[in-house]
Image (spheres, grey):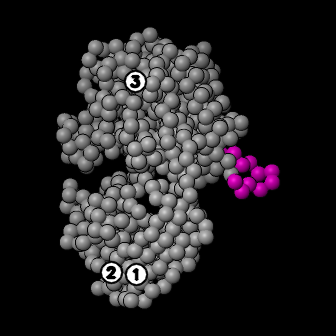
Amino acid sequence: MITRLATTLAAALVFLGAAPSPQPMTPAEQVAANSVRSHVEFLADDRLEGRDTGSRGHEIGAQYVASRFREMGLEPGGPGGSWYQQVPLRRATIVQPTPTITLTINGQRQTLAWARDVALRPSLTERHRAIDARLVFVGFGLDEPLLGIADYRGLDTKGAIVVSLAGTPPGLPSEVAAHLTSAKADAAAAHGAIGLVEVGGEGRLTSNVATDAVRATTSWVAPDGSTGASPLRASLSLSKAWQARLFDGAPKSLAALHGEAATTSPRGFPLPSRLSLVADTAWTDFTSPEVIGRLPGADPVRAAENVVLMAHLDHLGMMSDAKPGEDRIYNGALDNAAGVATMLEAAREFVASGRRPMRSVLFIANTGEEKGLLGASYFAAHPTVPLASIASVVDLDMPLPLYDFTDVTAFGAEHSTIARTVADAGAAMGIRVSPDPLPQESIFVRSDHYRFVQKGVPAILLMTGYANGGEAVWKNFLAHVYHSPADDLSQPIQWRALARYGMLNYGIARALADAPDRPRWVAHDYFGDRFAPNQPRATPLAP
């Protein structure tokens, strides 16, 4: 594979070199650098007003990406020959006056104070909710046969609101723990529960009740009524004091359970309490597009399969409470105009090569990532190509071309043979692949590619690495720039580095598209076993 890839990239590498060079850019380098720069400068311009999902600025950005796809000669990849897959979104807010929420504990009934004692998440499927349900403690609220975790065993939770400890039992790998945490609502619904309350660890809250009380909920809601939101009717936050009160008269106090949870997963039990609520929700329905271009494959058989290269186009919009004279636009130059730019550059390299890939390649600019991976979630649930035809996904989210990067991190690569592809493509350019420098952050389950993992598709998130000064750059960016108006074009962006990152992504996508076989999940990998139990496996990767 290295030989084939080196041959494919040879002409470009003459100019881009095996490592960043301090020499002036050659004409070919200049073309690539100008290409990515033009994309970032347009998408991060103030006039796009931060590209918030559903906003005019995002629509302009989507039209720009579609026009670049057309210019390159790609085919539209959306429904009905369109460049766009419109994602039907709904924003839900609690209607004032505030909901009425009461707790009855050991026969004593008390109304909770909204935004001080309790908050309730708005519903995306019920405008009016009237609920009265018993409460059941369910330990950590997890159900995973693959790991022998069965917190619901022996408990009657049908029609109940379940109360779970926040987090997971000790000893789980961070990515597995993050997945299980995100799946608690699904586990509760699978066992017949209608609501969920998470109670925090000792000395902390699971959430900020005052903030949760005014927070809107946004997700996709398809015409058939299916949704990407929680399947539960009620998700609530309680203050620390009321979290403890839930266990008054119970077999164990919350403090005792906290101590037990430090070493094991506490067993559940019914609580001597009920919760009643009456609440109304207001909805605002809107749409926002996924932008999809497709480069058809050349092989008679493999052309029916698709490699996906994607990056999220949306960002945070504009600050609503900016002070006079304060910069209020979240331009998102690196998060994620830079990712979209490198996706477009990879598409340009495919076309400029004059050689169609064996498999087809889908290029997707996602919407709604900042609101919870919504566009990717919708596409994975309503793909414009057969889901089984998607061989692999590479997600480009927030590269930092602020230094001469010499390594990359492929989050999740160890779970599938995509790791080998990334390593080969990097070796051809003198770029090494480094281990996840932030395993505690569980980044693998926090970006758009993960919605495809949950459908059984091998997928990774690729970002520039920590080597050659990258660690200091990343720490400064995350501390002072990330999700702030400072992520704009005033940063010292190295356009040659961004072009080189685009070239690497082209090499990865080219290798995935031309390989004789599709990527495989590694044998005995948790995510492969959970989401793709019937797919063929590869031998474990060498460390």
Report if the CB atoms under discs 2 and 3 are less than 8 Å apart: no
Q: Secondary structure at mark 3?
A: strand
Q: Which residue is outermost to the right?
A: 324
Circle 1 is placed at which residue position?
246
Give 145 or 500, whichever is nearer the viewer.
145
Report if the CB atoms under discs 1 and 3 are less than 8 Å apart: no
Q: Which amino acid, by three-letter code, is at mark 3?
A: Val
Q: Secondary structure at mark 2?
A: strand
Kindly indicate the quadrant of the structure image that contains residue 510: top left
CA distance separating discs 1 and 3 = 53 Å
Q: Which mark lies nearer to you, 2 or 3?
A: 2
Circle 3 is placed at which residue position?
361
Relative to 316, 409 lies left or right = left
* Residue 458 coordinates in the image, percent (x, y): 31, 37
Mark closer to the chain start, 1 or 3: 1
* Residue 193 coordinates in the image, percent (x, y): 32, 66
Q: Which amino acid, by three-letter code, is at mark 1?
A: Leu
Seen at 39% across and 89% down, the residue is: 107
Q: Which amino acid, by three-letter code, is at mark 2?
A: Leu
Q: Secondary structure at mark 1?
A: loop
* Residue 352 coordinates in the image, percent (x, y): 49, 13
* Residue segment shown in magenta: 320-332
Mark closer to the chain start, 2 or 1: 1
SS assignment for the magenta stretch, majority: loop
Q: Examine the rendered structure and indicate whether residue 58 appears above or below residue 516.
A: below
Seen at 40% across and 81% down, the residue is: 246
Residue 271: image tag: 2
Report if the CB atoms under discs 2 and 1 are less than 8 Å apart: yes
Seen at 30% across and 14% down, the residue is: 299
